[in-house]
Image (spheres, rainbow, N blue to C red):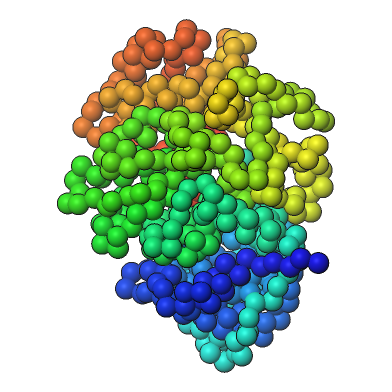
Amino acid sequence: MATLSVAAILAENARRRPHKTALVEGGLRLSFGEVWQRSLARAGALAGLGVRPGDRVALMAPNTAEFPVAYYAITAAGGVVVPVHLLLSPREVTHVLKDSGAGLLLVHPAQAETGRAAADALGIRVVVLGEELDRLADAAVPLSSYLTREADDPAVIFYTSGTTGEPKGAVLSHFNIVMNATVNAFDANDIRPDDIALGALPLFHAFGQTVSLNSTWRAGATLVLLPRFDAARAIELMVQEGVNTLHGVPTMFVALAAAAEHAAALPDLRVCVSGGASLPVAVLERFEAAFGAKIYEGYGLSETSPTATVNQPVFGTRAGTIGHPLWGIDVEIARADTEGSVELLPAGELGEVVVRGHNVFSGYLGRPEATAEALVDGWFRTGDLGVKDEDGFLSIVDRKKDIIIRGGYNVYPREIEEILMRHPGVAQVAVIGLPDDLHGEEVCAVVVPEPGSGPDAAGITEWSKEHLGKYKYPRRVEFTDALPLGPSMKVLKRELRARYTA
């Protein structure tokens, strides 16, 4: 029987390169040996609190050193990590704790009030990271090594952002996470032990956790944490620490390209990876021009550990696409309206993106019906619409549920966003469908204007007419200072729909 643990990612580094810098946060610098010793001490404290293999432990913390230490402590003790989004209300945190069956919450002092309110409602034990957990760790007997698990045992339960109804827990195994970290590090892009990566994506989210934390450490490279993303501060920190690897979402690349104009110096970046949402080509071009670095855009979901595809040097790269599947993973296009089976489509046809491979999750915790809908004929149905070209490059057209149907025609918001991002007065844009008596839905562009420019709604509509088909251009344009972002930095279109429908 094969056994495996996510904790091995850190344990092996402590064995192979104990004195190498693993983690930098502010003035704190820890070697792999030091991070592992801290994790084993806290794993001993967790065992003392009654955590047994398979028990769920919730973890609520920002990108500070406490997060990776606690994360590896939980996995070393054989526990299952339940990361909690930091922007949730106490009611939403209560849902995650209750649904996951967590018996313990480890919470950072900054989130302690929200965390405690949620845990108290359920009578769950709370331990505050920092002083309280340190004290327990000092008094405990550290584990001598990690407790290993079966490869298919749960390692992490990610709560999906719940665009429809209550968030569901996506269960990922040790095998899912170790394999995704490994192929990200060694097969997708060439990550080297002397690389230094910026950890600015939230570690409680799948992208930050697998790609920034686990893949970086799988390669034996250094992670520099930035607890709160600010573009100017990120550039300063990257220059100061010699960062050459950057993982980000489109909103971060927009902000970095703008901040680059005023920066005293820019980092020398070798690998930049974008994910989390579609990257407009105009943003990619702006960033690459500012930093002289290439962006490798990828794609994935919590349910796929998360990375499914990415632009990879081995296949060449193509702007506006999400590249090719990772090693050992198949990504195809299937007929979107066929429910009970997966019918694959030939190259060039639009359909639903489906994924199979070592990265596909075990299922939704306690939700067999939702699992059966998502896992069909050995494939995971993503709910995203895409197309695969003759060269095997995949492109995401849009979320199935974000399509606007105007007067019987399908309108894909992403296509309009790509065009509008080239308007000189537009810094950011989200396109949504709003209810309309005549056409069923009307196309609305919600625009964040470029600083110092004063675009007007009629002007943007007129400009759009020249670049878009008659049924596509936005009849309605709204302006806002900032787009609402979820914890994983995705634009919350459902909030915009609610705001502008009202």
Tell which of 258 and 98 is nearer to you: 258
Seen at 38% across and 23% down, the residue is 420
Measuring from the top left, give residue 362's x and y in whole percent: 75, 52
Q: Hey, which residue is sitting farthest left in the picture?
A: 264
In screen coordinates, is 429 left or right of 365? left
Seen at 36% across and 40% down, the residue is 294
Tell which of 328 and 67 is nearer to you: 328
The answer to which image quadrant residue 2 occupies is bottom right
Whether residue 381 is visible, yes or no, is yes
In screen coordinates, is 282 left or right of 364? left
Q: Is the residue 259 above or below the residue 443 in the image?
A: below
Seen at 51% across and 54% down, the residue is 185
In screen coordinates, is 465 left or right of 45? left
Indicate the quadrant containing the N terminus: top left, top right, bottom left or bottom right: bottom right
Tell which of 345 and 113 is nearer to you: 345
The answer to which image quadrant residue 50 occupies is bottom right
Measuring from the top left, give residue 398's x and y in whole percent: 56, 28
